[in-house]
Amino acid sequence: MRIYLIGFMGSGKSTLGKELASRLGCSFLDLDQFIELSCRKSVPEIFLDEGELSFREKERACLGQIAEKDHVVVATGGGAPCFFDNMEFMNRTGCCVFLDVQTGELARRLTNEKADRPLIRGKGPDELVRFIGAMMAERRPYYEKARCVVKGDSISVEDVIKKMEEDCE
């Protein structure tokens, strides 16, 4: 069993991922943390020192390493599905679950996390909503390639498990 959680930042990938892994008796991996341990640099440092393309190549290589692990729930970064053949790879090597949370709810959740997230740092409320809407418009075609889509503003582990039983068996 290998489950990849995808979706925009603030959609609950890490929070739900930890709970889902615990419920299913699996390990939990955060892809960005896995990259940081592998590279011995933070994600922002990789972006700054080496650029986005280098980061995306490292991200793809780490996905390949994770795909060798069994019984794992993986929280991907929000952009991971949008590069190379990552979506096809995740669908081929596990059950890919898109946590589809509405723009307004994402903005509400991210308002208090702006200092920790460079892409949204300094954005006012309206600007944040516009930014999320624009990014989701770009990313949605990739996200919707997931075999399993769970929609809602308060997605529970039970919602994810039920949808996975329907779509990922």
Image: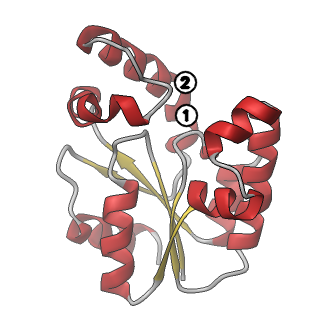
**Badge number at residue 33:** none
Circle nearer the viewer, 2 or 1 = 2
Placement of the N terminus among the 4 image quadrants:
bottom right
Q: Position of residue 109 (x, y in %)?
A: 24, 37
- As drawn, is 27 to the left or to the right of 42? left
Q: Position of residue 85 (x, y in %)?
A: 76, 48
Q: Residues within 10 Å of mark 1 (few under 14, many from 20)?
A: few
Q: Say what secondary structure mark 1 lies in.
A: helix
109 lies above or below 80: above
> Residue at left 82%, top 39%?
54
Query: Which residue carries the number 1 mark?
Result: 141
Figure check: 106 above or below 19:
above
Task: Specify the label residue 138 is tagged with.
Answer: 2
**Above or below, 144 relative to 94:** above
Residue drawn at the location 49% of the way across and 33% of the way down:
140
Q: Estimate the spatial distance between the alpha carbons at disc 2 and disc 1, rounded to whole Å.
A: 7 Å
Q: Amino acid at mark 2?
A: Glu
Q: Quadrant of residue 153?
A: top left
Residue 134 in view, yes or no = yes
| Residues at marks 2 and 1 touching, judged by CB atoms closer than 8 Å | yes
Q: Secondary structure at mark 2?
A: helix
Q: Which kind of residue does numbered mark 1 sit on?
A: Pro
Looking at the image, is 80 positioned above or below residue 21? above
Q: Quadrant of residue 114?
A: top left
Residue at horizontal 20 percent and vertical 30 percent from the top: 108
Q: Residue 111 at what x, y percent from top left?
A: 25, 28
How busy is the neighbourhood of tag 2: few (under 14 within 10 Å), some, or many (20 plus)? few
- Position of 75 with respect to 122 (left or right) is right
